[in-house]
Image (cartoon, rainbow, N blue to C red):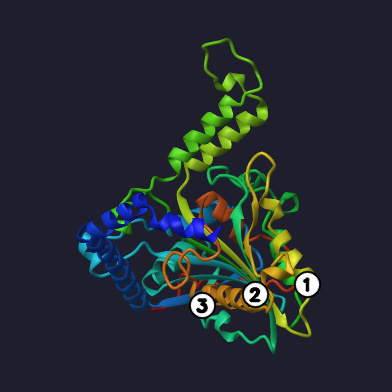
Amino acid sequence: MFQRFFSLFQAEPFLNAWDSFWSLTPVWLPILLLGVFFEVWMRYVRTKYIIEQGSVLLELKIPKLLDKPVAAMEIVLQALSQPLVGSYIEVFLKGRIRPWFSLELVSLGGQVKFFIWTHKKFKNLIESQIYSQFPTVEIYEVPDYSLQVPFNEDVYSYFGAQLKLSKADVYPIKSYIDYGLNDNPKEEFKVDPITPVIEYLGSLKQDEQTWIQILVRAHREENLKDARFFKKTDWKAQAKKEIDKIISESPIKLEEGKTGTLQNLTDIQKDTINAIQRNLSKTAFDSVIRCVYLAKKESFNGANIGGMLGSMKQYSSGNLNGFRPSFTTSFDYPWQDFRGKRLKDAKQTILDAYKRRSYFHPPHRGFGGSSFVLSVEELATMFHFPGGVSTTPTFSRIVSKKGEPPANLPI
């Protein structure tokens, strides 16, 4: 058997192919070296650019009485769409990239907090956008809570997960509009999908923490300015393909030679197409969602892992979209990780990726699976300030509104 295998490498066709391969070295070797140099150079200049930008973590403190529609958060998040990167000189010599942001819902020992992580130059933009829609919200630049937790398995136990969509990106999740919040109903009639997340976060004990991170950057067609030699289309082409697919699957039989139309579809199919088209009309973001649950070893409660992942189920819909894990710090079978080294590496990596807010660029580019596209409507559904409908006692709120100075105050 082995003699037959090795005899293949001694056959004349193989030897001729091998000679041809080496004779073309002056062609393929410079291309290979150029590609390696380009990758290393782009990694260097982009890393340098990212470090130069610096970063800040903003904590958003919400007043006890806040009666603003979720659509107001859409306007705030719209400002995070920064698709331009500048000239080719800025891209290839200075490493300029599309900026990204991190929207974070966090429980620190049961205390529920809202954070936005950003590069320093966007701090004023974010503050002005929030104050324009939520003038009673208070914003503070705070130390990074995630840096307070080292990776030390002698003290802490960790579980991390990264989520993905269960269907194609163009299918929207169940948004606040589907829950009727676009009409801004009275508090007693609200069904707010963010409430289960806040209730779960507020249920944690003193030595437990859960971090939920949504990384976002402007979605657009990618080309050479994104260091792509081959163009990558945006999600509009995918949407057309999915709509055509739905129409072609119409249960109503058509006469031979006729094509499907909306009149031939069921009500569910029509609603699905309308939802896709509505989602497509909104500003879109490349998105990544990470979740981390950690606790002191003696306080770690495995049931809270299910609670963390289960708190996202209200965004799912049978005919639309939902979330499911694409990566977790666990293995299904013992032979996948005999000595526990892979599990330790996975936990350490997702913790480091979370702290660095890294996915779109090194050091953790592409970690945990592919990114997906969410519209600003979907993001506002998952990250907005709840009104009085959320009564979680550990949800940090400002006791009173900020008072305005009297009009006749002497200058």
Give the mark nearest the N terminus, 2 or 1.
1
Q: Residue at x 49, y 38 (%)?
A: 239
Residue 343 position, x and y percent, is: 65, 75
Q: Residue at x 71, y 54 (%)?
A: 313
Q: Which residue is mark 1?
A: 302
Closest to the observer, 5 or 164: 5
Foreground: disc 2 or disc 1: 2
Q: Which residue is mark 2?
A: 343
Q: Secondary structure at mark 3?
A: strand
Closest to the observer, 335 or 332: 335
Q: Residues within 10 Å of mark 3 (few under 14, many from 20)?
A: few
Q: Secondary structure at mark 2?
A: helix
Horizontal arrangement in the rendering, residue 83 relative to residue 272 (left or right) = left
Q: Secondary structure at mark 1?
A: loop
Q: Residue at x 66, y 27 (%)?
A: 267
Kind of residue sitting beneath label 2: Leu
Kind of residue sitting beneath label 1: Gly
Residue 204 position, x and y percent, is: 75, 74
Closest to the observer, 251 or 335: 335
Q: Which residue is mark 3?
A: 140
Q: Quadrant of residue 168?
A: top right
Q: Residue at x 28, y 71 (%)?
A: 41
Q: Residues within 10 Å of mark 2 (few under 14, many from 20)?
A: some
